[in-house]
Every structure is written in C-alpha cells, then in structure tokens.
Amino acid sequence: MIAIPPNGVVDIAVADEAEAVAVARRYLSYFQGRLERWEAADQRLLRGLIPENRLRIYEVRSVIETRADAGPLPREGKKRPNIDTW
C-alpha cells in the first residue's frame, strides 16, 4: 500500500505496482485521439436531463454518461461526498 500525502498529490491509491500500471493505462486510453469507430448515447437525451432553469438541480453523472463516449468512466478518485470529480 502506498502512503497518500496529505496535500492530495496522489489521487488514486492502488495496492501495488501492477495495479498502478493498469490504472495508468486505462486513463491514458481516454486520450488516444480520433477513432475510426466509436459509440455515444443519443445526444438529444440531454434536453431532458438538463433543466431549462439553471437554478434547478439535476443528476450531473447522467449528463456526463450521456455526453461521453460509450464505455466505463473513471471512478477511482478520492471519495468526495456530494461532488462528482470527473
């Protein structure tokens, strides 16, 4: 187990070096540039997810999952209550 400095330099704690490499590869795969084939949800769904009144609350996670390419999203970060840090 690696020690996490109190200043927040390490955002993803892993058990060992092998897991660290796997997590790093997964994150780097999100920045691979243009793809010939990709999938995403129907973007028209965003009209129902984001309220017209900007003062109303809504599920940010649903918006991100709809807006992003299909596939798993990173969720390994520190646990921050009531905040989605994507």
Image (spheres, rainbow, N blue to C red):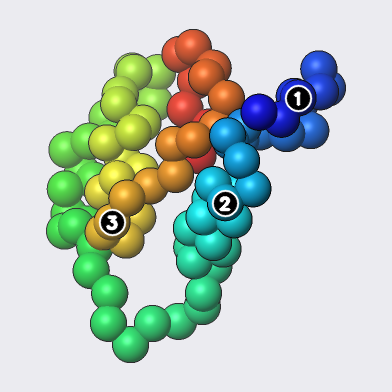
Q: Determine the CA span between mark 2 and mark 1.
A: 16 Å
Tag 3, which secondary structure?
loop
Query: Looking at the figure, which quarter contains the N terminus?
Result: top right
Q: Position of residue 21 (x, y in %)?
A: 59, 56
Does residue 36 appear left or right of residue 28 in this picture?
left
Along the viewing direction, whichever of 52 and 66 lies nearer the viewer: 66
Say whether marks 2 and 1 touch (CB < 8 Å). no
Residue beneath label 2, please? 18
* Label disc, if present, on residue 3 of the rendered structure: 1
Which amino acid lies under the numbered mark 2 shown in the image of this protein?
Answer: Ala
Density class for disc 2 (Cα within 10 Å; few <14, some 14-19, many ≥20) is: few
Sequence-wise, the earlier of marks 3 and 1 is 1
Residue 71: mark in rendering: 3
Between residue 35 and residue 48, name the one nearer to us. Answer: 35
Query: Furthest-top residue in view?
Result: 81
Q: Amino acid at mark 1?
A: Ala
Classify residue 51 by image quadrant: top left
Task: Count all numbered tags in the image, as a single digit.
Answer: 3
Residue 49's disc is none
Mark 2 residue element: helix
Task: Classify 10 Å Cα crowding around label 3: few (below 14), some (14-19), many (20 and above).
Answer: few
User: Disc 3 residue type?
Assistant: Gly
Residue 41 as seen in the image, left or right of residue 52: left
Camera-side residue of 27 and 81 = 27
Q: Earlier in the sequence, mark 2 or mark 1?
A: 1
Contact between labelled residues 3 and 2, with CB atoms less than 8 Å apart: no
